Image (cartoon, helix red, strand yellow):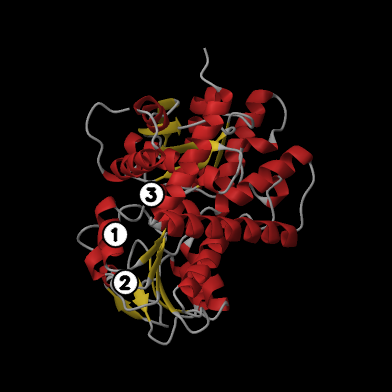
């Protein structure tokens, strides 16, 4: 771990673990073990750009825990990626997998650059070089990457091919979130969105709000926010505002998510969408809606923005969108926050299903995938809300405590070698 005091998402992740360790009465040594990543790798990723110049980016892979199974976690391409962010995301993956009873540990990876400023050919070269650099520490039984911010199924195909060429045979299980034609799973592309939308409806009902006719605002229109908005709209939720990295649009009568999707596919942003009015993206967080879904990046609900939240429930589609200070403010205001390790766990659940299918060399139907995902999400929701009520805890505190307990119990059963 860094010798300096962590800030940002790592600070929040460590604070959440500390509260769980205190609740579970873990020893100082056990707490430290759970807080410390098992393995970290930082690599240089040189790129020959299309114009012949050479750029060098920093790449990371952090494997936080292996106690319950192979490490599992996404690969992020974004300018702000650094080692502490990846450490936090890897830790949250450990708890997420444990909470949903998926037999994985947590990992995360990233390369610090803006993919929007690179051609497809450059993205392929970056991906293959990064894969080559981390190849000694990944594998279908060791560490299995998946898509995250700035990456997609094409990225996973390049990783799979690079790894397979190095091994001398095709290895479908090295990644999840692959294209269907390379062994991907039906239902995987919408899995995180589906989980977010399903839990959002459960959260609304827990507050006495029927989803059909409820209102929602979604921050982020990427692989999570777009799908969640679409599913919620199909369930009768009126999605009145959506934002992306460039701007935001709102319509009090509800946005047409299908039309907005077509517009974004053509223009690259929600900005200028004729079916809504332009608003400042910061206004979205403060809108009077039943559900607020931050589905972009971490750290958007802070001590400054949390007091403006008017939603009854906040459902974390992104990883770590709510800071520790904001959690306290929202709890005092009576806002129900559904934590990321529960709300957005659909992706890793179906990633597990994909990994199982790769090992079986047998594809499940989309109906089977969706039914099994819904069953896992509903069980986790019931387990977390029951634990929270029994112990007088927030949903985040309950979810983290349950997950940490499962990892700790697995560690105790395995023992400490040597």
Which of 296 and 93 lies nearest the eye of the viewer? Answer: 93
- Asked if residue 1 lies left or right of residue 121, the reply is left
* Distance from the alpha carbon under mark 2 to that under mark 1: 11 Å
Foreground pick, 376 / 73:
376
Q: Residue at x 72, y 41 (%)?
A: 358
Gap between marks 1 and 3, in whole Å?
28 Å
Q: Which residue is mark 2?
A: 284
Residue 53 in the image: above or below residue 401: above
**Residue 331 locus on image (x, y percent):** 30, 62
Foreground residue among 417 and 24: 24
Q: Is residue 157 left or right of residue 49?
A: right
- Which of labels 1 and 3 is toward the front? 1
Q: From the image, state whether disc 3 or disc 2 is nearer to you.
A: 2
Q: Which residue is mark 3?
A: 117
Dot 3 crowding, Cα within 10 Å, few <14, some 14–19, many 20+ = few
Where is mark 1, residue-wise? 301
Q: Position of residue 415 (x, y in %)?
A: 54, 21
Placement of the N terminus among the 4 image quadrants: top left
| Mark found first going from the N terminus, 2 or 1 | 2
């Amino acid at each position: 771990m860094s010798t300096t005091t962590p800030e940002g998402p790592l600070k929040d992740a460590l604070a959440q673990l500390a509260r769980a360790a205190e609740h579970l009465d873990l020893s100082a040594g056990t707490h430290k073990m759970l807080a410390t990543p098992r393995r970290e790798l930082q690599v240089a990723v040189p790129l020959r750009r299309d114009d012949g110049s050479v750029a060098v980016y920093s790449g990371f892979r952090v494997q936080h825990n292996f106690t319950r199974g192979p490490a599992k976690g996404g690969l992020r391409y974004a300018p702000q990626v650094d080692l502490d962010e990846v450490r936090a995301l890897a830790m949250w993956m450990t708890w997420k997998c444990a909470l949903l009873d998926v037999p994985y540990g947590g990992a995360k990876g990233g390369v610090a650059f803006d993919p929007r400023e690179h051609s497809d050919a450059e993205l392929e070269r970056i991906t293959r070089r990064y894969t080559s650099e981390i190849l000694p520490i990944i594998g279908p039984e060791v560490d299995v990457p998946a898509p995250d911010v700035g990456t997609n199924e094409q990225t996973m195909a390049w990783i799979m091919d690079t790894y397979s060429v190095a091994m001398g045979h095709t290895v479908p299980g090295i990644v999840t979130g692959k294209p269907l034609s390379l062994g991907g799973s039906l239902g995987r592309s919408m899995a995180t969105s589906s989980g977010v939308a399903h839990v959002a409806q459960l959260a609304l009902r827990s507050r006495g709000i029927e989803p059909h006719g409820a209102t929602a605002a979604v921050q982020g229109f990427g692989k999570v926010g777009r799908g969640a908005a679409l599913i919620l709209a199909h369930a009768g939720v009126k999605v009145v505002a959506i934002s992306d990295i460039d701007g935001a649009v709102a319509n009090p009568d509800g946005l047409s998510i299908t039309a907005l999707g077509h517009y974004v596919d053509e223009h690259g942003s929600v900005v200028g969408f004729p079916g809504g009015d332009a608003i400042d993206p910061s206004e979205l967080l403060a809108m009077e809606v039943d559900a607020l879904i931050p589905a972009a990046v971490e750290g958007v609900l802070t001590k400054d923005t949390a007091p403006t939240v008017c939603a009854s429930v906040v459902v974390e589609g992104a990883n770590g969108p709510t800071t520790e200070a904001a959690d306290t403010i929202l709890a005092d205001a009576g806002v129900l926050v559904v934590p990321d390790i529960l709300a957005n766990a659909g992706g890793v659940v179906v990633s597990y299903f994909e990994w199982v299918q790769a090992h079986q060399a047998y594809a499940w139907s989309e109906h089977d995938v969706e039914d099994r995902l819904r069953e896992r999400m509903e069980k986790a929701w019931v387990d977390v809300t029951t634990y929270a009520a029994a112990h007088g805890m927030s949903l985040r505190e309950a979810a983290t405590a349950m997950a940490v307990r499962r990892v700790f119990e697995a560690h105790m059963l395995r023992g400490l070698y040597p």
